[in-house]
Amino acid sequence: MSERVALIVGGTGQDSAYLADFLLGNGYRVHATSRDAALARLDGLRALGVRITVHSMTPVDYHSVAQVIEAVARRLTEGNDDISKSE
């Protein structure tokens, strides 16, 4: 069976934290996006003990979306999927 991966767009809010927690509990590797990962508040995710990777992405910019998809694919092949902020 192939590995299941989820990418949550706008994934640093309260609802997204619960979604990430649910997905992790069902065996997914979870990545999330924020407009600026360096400034993203991860309090809600940390409070739930959710461990994900946060990427900077502008959803209306094709190149930004493509960069995040490539970064997620690269992290999966490298096996590096801890909670962190990625640009």
Image: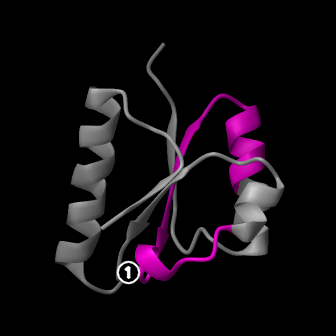
Image-quadrant location for residue 40: bottom right
Q: Is residue 23 magenta?
A: yes
Residue drawn at x 24%, y 40% as measured from the top left: 74
Q: Residue furthest top?
A: 1
Q: Nearer the viewer, residue 55 or 6?
A: 55
* Neighbour tally class for label 1: few under 14, some 14-19, many 20 plus, Cα within 10 Å: some
Locate residue 41 relative to residue 65 in the image: left or right.
right
Residue type at tag 1: Pro
The structure's colour scheme is: one colour
> Can you tell which quarter of the image residue 75 is in?
top left
Q: Indicate whether 40 appears above or below 26.
A: below
Residue 4 within the magenta-colored segment of the rendering: no
Q: Is residue 49 above or below residue 60?
A: above
Counting from the top left corner in percent of width and height, residue 11 is at: 59, 68
Q: Position of residue 27 (x, y in %)?
A: 65, 28
Q: Quadrant of residue 66?
A: bottom left
Q: Residue at x 77, y 45 (%)?
A: 22
Q: Is residue 29 above or below residue 7?
A: above
Question: Residue lying furthest left in this view?
Answer: 63
Residue 62 spot, x, y in % from top left: 21, 77
Residue at mark 1:
59
> Which residue is rendered at x = 60% and y = 35% of the image?
28
> How far from the left and from the top, in percent, is residue 38?
43, 76
Q: Which residues are magenta?
A: 20-42
Q: Quadrant of the C terminus?
A: bottom left
Describe residue 35's horizontal placement relative to residue 70 as left or right.
right
Name the residue nearer the viewer: 15 or 79. 79
Residue 22 versus residue 78 in the image, above or below: below
Secondary structure at numbered mark 1: loop
**Horizontal placement of 36 versus 8: left or right?**
left
